[in-house]
Amino acid sequence: MEFLFKLQNALIKKTVLLLISSFFLFAGTLQAQSFDKGLKLYQQGKYKEAASVFTQIDTDKGHLFSGKAYFGLGKYLTAKSYLEQLDSDDTAELYLEAQYNLALADFQLGQYGKALNRLYLLKDQERKTQLVTDAINFYDDILHFLTMNQRKNAFQQADAPQIKYDLVNAAFGDVDYSIAKMLYSQLVQTKIDTTIPAMQKLSKMIRDSVSYAVEKSYNNSPTIPKGLTYNIGAALPSYDNDSADFEVARSLYFGFVLAAETFNQQHPNKKAFIRFQNTAANKDTAAFAMNNFGWNFNADAILGPLFSEPAKKMAEYAEQYQIPMLAPLANSDELDGDNPYVYQANPTLGSHGKQMAEYAVNTLNMDTLAVIAEKNTLGVSAAYEFRNRAERLGARVSYFFIEDFASQGFELTEYTKYFTGDSVKVDTLGYHELDGIYAPFTGQAAPTLAELLWVDLEGLSSTLPILGSQVWGDINVPKDQFDNRNIYFTESFYLNKKSQKVEQFSKRFEERFDIEANRFSMIGYDAAGFVLRTLNRIGNPALLKDALKNQPLYEGLISNISFEGDRVNQQVKIFTVSKTGVQPVLKYR
């Protein structure tokens, strides 16, 4: 019996061991299958789905790829929390790969000193694997990428004296002599050995300004690290499909996305991602969105929002986070203010007035002008800017009427009498002989005012040219009356349906989103395209705020963008109206 009892116990223990072994073997198989599934999703660029798989795998590889997946989503802080779970006691290859990816995350977060510290450890590896070679190249690229302020911060974060030396040495030849001397002084203060050949070389270079000038290269094209990611915020309201504004917001967003995808196809070593945040139509939601862009996405630029209230609130945070914000549709003269981080792609009415004045004086050779606009409308800003620019160009504005015509029953004759075509009246009544009339009518009453002004001019036998706002492109008058009068008006956007560029965009847009392109999708594409082209030129997003002001003319699908040193787009399109229809003037085609 005792023998049978011992045998039974032995069999039970063996069975339990087999069950435990089978369980772990089964669990390991499931984990391997899950990892393979996550890896496949990751390789397809489905980072969100991949992250949900990897985060369930509590292994070194699971933590590594969780971090890589969250990095792909632009969630750099979350990525770091997983990558930092690997330490030097783990498998060497996995640990080094985690350090490299941590350096990538630090770089995207603007922690350049921390990134250099990690890469320096990889540089020091005896075995020069592809990962180590990539780390060496990335290290060198960062050294030549930084602005002076970024270099200062990296210098302060650097752990090793060699990193501090590399930061200073990389700047020599690219900065002014006085800055080079200061950098050398800072290096000496770290107690670095000044007798080593490398330090003696720097000392010799800054011995005097003449010696330094020989080495100075004035390199204005910094090295751009491969894999650099630009995070562009899309600050737009989210609507139900039945909302009237749904189409506008959706089309703008899809335009942003297609511009980023086009950029990525054209620049394999850089990537741009559009990060959406709902701004709703109120300032509280907009404030939350802007904080999210600053904290979670480390946004390099913001596209949007649509409405003035959210825009004003977001503008405050744009300055605090130092993130440039480009509004694609807003044309308020109040939005820009003194905020150096706020740009408007849609020219203000003031810009319309200024550009029309330049065209009237410089192209049409108009010397004496009249201005008439409705009080308390956006057209008032255009009227004042027109007068100011015309007079600066040497013209004379003889009549300037800003009146509340609505309260006067839209009776214009008291003002239009000065626009007579009767030369006898002009002479006898002392009226000024005019070359043209600027009438920037806007608002609900604009069509009525335009038609009344036209009728008065016809009754006065006046053939004076009319210059004005977009309402003049839609004026409802008999076509035969266009023979005796030239009409010019300004628009921010113009869609040439015969353009091959527009045709190609429309085809790509429909293939990508399964809906037809419209003017808002093109406006979104142009706004995002302009920002991305600027980033491509300068490389470092820290330079974007000032670079936007001086970016060369961007000729888009539906709009041209050039700030000409300002923060409001100065590219207004001018059109002429005739009985054959509306045409852009030759200068602006």
Image: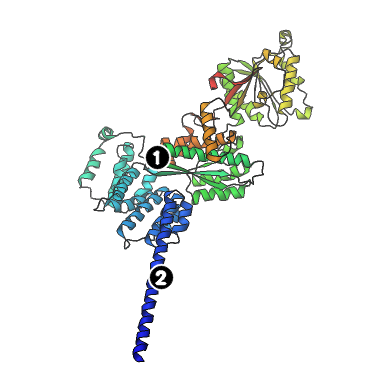
Front-lying residue, 562 or 213: 562
- Residue 585, given in percent of the width and then of the height, sits at 57, 19
Front-lying residue, 192 or 546: 546
Front-lying residue, 564 or 1: 1
Residue at the extreme bottom: 1
Which residue, given by chain and number where applicable, does mark 1 sit on?
Answer: 268
Q: Amino acid at mark 1?
A: Pro
Tell me if mark 2 has few (under 14), some (14-19) or many (20+) residues whose alpha carbon lies within 10 angstroms of its own.
Answer: few
Tell me if mark 1 has few (under 14), some (14-19) or many (20+) residues whose alpha carbon lies within 10 angstroms of its own.
Answer: few
In the picture, residue 11 is in which quadrant?
bottom left
**Residue 185 seen anywhere in this rendered image of the structure:** no
Quarter holding the N terminus is bottom left
Q: Please give the name of the residue rendered at 33% of the width and 62% of the height, measured from the top-left corner.
A: 90
174 lies left or right of 385:
left
Mark number, residue 23: 2
Q: Please give the name of the residue rendered at 75% of the width and 18% of the height, measured from the top-left corner.
A: 456
In the picture, residue 443 is in which quadrant?
top right
Mark number, residue 286: none
